[in-house]
Amino acid sequence: MSEIITHQSERVTRFLSTIDRMMEALDKLSKSHAPRFGGEHYVTDAELTERLKISDRTTQEWRSSGKIDYIQFEKKGKILYRESDIQKFLEKHYLKSWQ
């Protein structure tokens, strides 16, 4: 006997569930992707603190002491970091294992 496939069929519901998960993953990816500007990716202060698991105060100290380059719009405006500058900063502070 042939099985009649309906919208309530287990195969259809599994297929639709898979599509839903894929759509959620694509939505997350599109929200986390920062467009390039002049060939560079930029991250916000909040994104940097989240990525490196550090506090806002730490990034403020790094900026104030000149340890990391940044862009600031207006006196108290949004702060951005170039991903290439973040990479340079991390490489500069990388400590090799002594063993």
Image: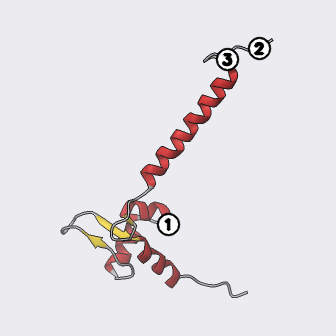
Tell me: 49 left or right of 1.
Answer: left
Task: Give the quarter of the figure containing the N terminus.
Answer: top right
- Residue at 50% in and 84% down: 92
Q: Mark 1 or mark 2: which comes first in sequence? A: 2
| 28 vs 44: above or below | above
Tell me: 86 left or right of 79.
Answer: right
List x then y, in percent, for residue 70: 33, 74
Q: Quadrant of residue 34?
A: bottom left
Mark 1 vs mark 2: in front: 2
Q: Which residue is mark 3?
A: 5
- Residue at 48% in and 47% down: 28
| 28 vs 76: above or below | above
Q: Residue furthest bottom?
A: 98
Residue 20 numbered mark, or none:
none
**Residue type marked 2:** Ser
| 59 vs 91: above or below | above
Q: Report, in whole angstroms, how far the alpha carbon at label 1 lies from the one at label 2.
A: 56 Å
Task: Give the quarter of the figure containing the C terminus.
Answer: bottom right
Q: Which residue is mark 1?
A: 52
**SS for callout 3:** loop
**Residue type marked 3:** Ile
Colour style of the rendered protein structure? secondary structure
* Mark 2 Cα-neighbour bin, 10 Å: few <14, some 14–19, many ≥20: few
Q: Mark 1 or mark 3: which comes first in sequence? A: 3
List x then y, in percent, for residue 62: 38, 77
Q: Residue furthest top?
A: 1
Between residue 82 and residue 16, name the one nearer to us: 16
Q: Report, in whole angstroms, how far the alpha carbon at label 1 lies from the one at label 3.
A: 49 Å
Q: Residue furthest front?
A: 2
- Residue at 67% in and 84% down: 97
Tell me: 42 left or right of 28.
Answer: left
